[in-house]
Amino acid sequence: MRLSAAAHTDRPWRIHEIAGDFDVEDVWRFRTPGGRADDFPALLAALQAARASDSSGISGLLFKIRWKLGEVFGWDRESAGTGGRVGSLRDRLPADLRDTPCPDDTDSPLTSVYVLDDEYAAEIANGTMHGVMHLGWVPDDTGPGYHLQMAVLVKPNGLFGRAYMAFIKPFRYLIVYPAMTRSWERTWNELVATR
């Protein structure tokens, strides 16, 4: 379910002090019925383990097309990424976050920035933008439980980057996020079933 930017900006996430110059592009809520305060690390591990199987269907095809276009047009060259065109957000981390262990992101296009008991941030940079996927574990408003919330933060690379983000918006809303929702909520249900 899509949320307003305030659902992210009004919470005291650590990402605000690290990526305050990024725009909030999207905020999405995922149903995690029965979520407990300490469930976030297990859910994060399950999502990362399930990542390899998320490359099927229309959403997977869109990502394959995007990576191919990036290869053809040079958007994904190493020089366009972190340590090239932009610095990594890890360079901005305050001292208390610098030494926190990060999950293995070897098979992911995203690079982990930090992980805490209730939030995780990973980044990606290319010729179109510098982006952050922020996951947070949020107490439910309506009862005793928690839900997963994702915010996508971006810093577009000039006018081309802004045009690119506008162009892909319908694909994100109509295909990518619904597929992600089904997959992530299925992962949660499988995790709960193993308790």
Image (cartoon, rainbow, N blue to C red):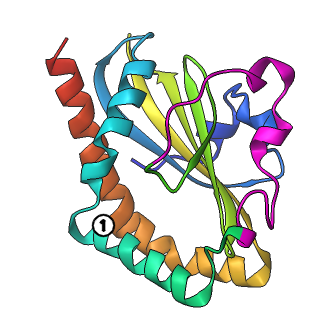
Q: Position of residue 108 (x, y in %)?
A: 46, 51
Q: Is residue 78 above or below residue 89?
A: below
Kindly indicate the quadrant of the structure image that contains residue 50: top left
Of residues 95 and 172, the one drawn nearer to the viewer in this rendering? 95
Judge left or right: residue 94 versus residue 186.
right
The question of residue 48 being in magenta is answered with: no
Of residues 31 and 52, the one drawn nearer to the viewer in this rendering? 52
Of residues 9 and 45, the one drawn nearer to the viewer in this rendering? 45
Judge left or right: residue 40 versus residue 126.
left
Q: Where is residue 187 in the image (x, y as percent from the top left)?
A: 25, 35
The residue lying at 74 percent from left, 71 percent from top is 79
The question of residue 94 being in magenta is answered with: yes
Q: Is residue 105 above or below residue 45?
A: below
Q: Quadrant of the C terminus?
A: top left
The residue lying at 30 percent from left, 41 percent from top is 184
Q: Which residue is the extreme one toward the bottom?
A: 72
* Magenta segment boundaries in residue numbering: 79-106
- Asked which secondary structure carries label 1, the reply is helix
Judge left or right: residue 15 versus residue 116.
right
Q: In this view, does 15 lie above or below 143?
A: below
Q: Which residue is the extreme one toward the left?
A: 193
Name the dominant secondary structure of the magenta segment.
Answer: loop
Q: Where is residue 59 in the image (x, y as percent from the top left)?
A: 31, 67
Q: In this view, does 30 lie above or below 127?
A: above
Kindly indicate the quadrant of the structure image that contains residue 130: bottom right
**Amino acid type of the residue that numbered disc 1 sits on in the rendered structure:** Gly
Give the residue pinned by disc 1. Answer: 60
Q: Position of residue 175 (x, y in %)?
A: 33, 67
The residue lying at 50 percent from left, 46 percent from top is 3
Q: Residues within 10 Å of mark 1 (few under 14, many from 20)?
A: some
